[in-house]
Image: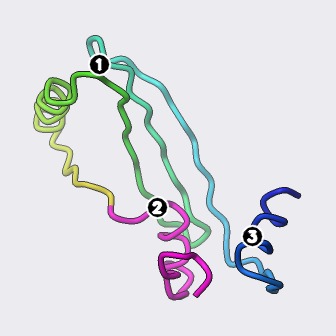
Amino acid sequence: LDPIRSLKEHCGNISLTGIGHLSTTRRYRMLQEFLLELDEVIYDDGGGSYELEIETSSPQQARRLLLLKFKQLSVNARPQHLSKLQALLQRSGIDIPGEDGCS
């Protein structure tokens, strides 16, 4: 597999072990002229998270519209600080690797 080969080239000969499982369901919805990409992530411990992405050339307009919609729906939205992999590692009790991904 190319990802495994690339990992070994970057980090050297390492041993790989399964750490957990996550499942992502992606949905697409329109909010006025904006295409929303909504991810629902379920982790093997039963917990979950949600992620929203918008590719746009009008980020301020999209942000205003989203904040209004969140307020209308009483959604407590906040910026995401961990990737899906980092969240899985954290939930599994594993230290999050350094910037090079090898430590």
Q: Which of marks 2 and 1 is nearer the N terminus?
A: 1
Q: In which quarter of the image is residue 16?
A: bottom right
Residue ID at (20%, 45%): 75
Which range is magenta?
81-103
Where is residue 69? Give x, y as percent: 17, 30
Neighbourhood count class around disc 2 (C-alpha, 10 Å): few under 14, some 14–19, many 20 upward:
few
- Give whichever of 11, 52 is nearer the camera: 11
Of tags 2 and 1, which is closer to the observer?
A: 2
State the SS at label 3.
helix
- Give whichever of 1, 41 is nearer the camera: 1
Mark identifier at residue 83: 2
The answer to if 92 sits in the magenta stretch is: yes
Neighbourhood count class around disc 3 (C-alpha, 10 Å): few under 14, some 14–19, many 20 upward:
some
Mark identifier at residue 7: 3
User: Farthest top residue?
Assistant: 33
Mark identifier at residue 31: 1
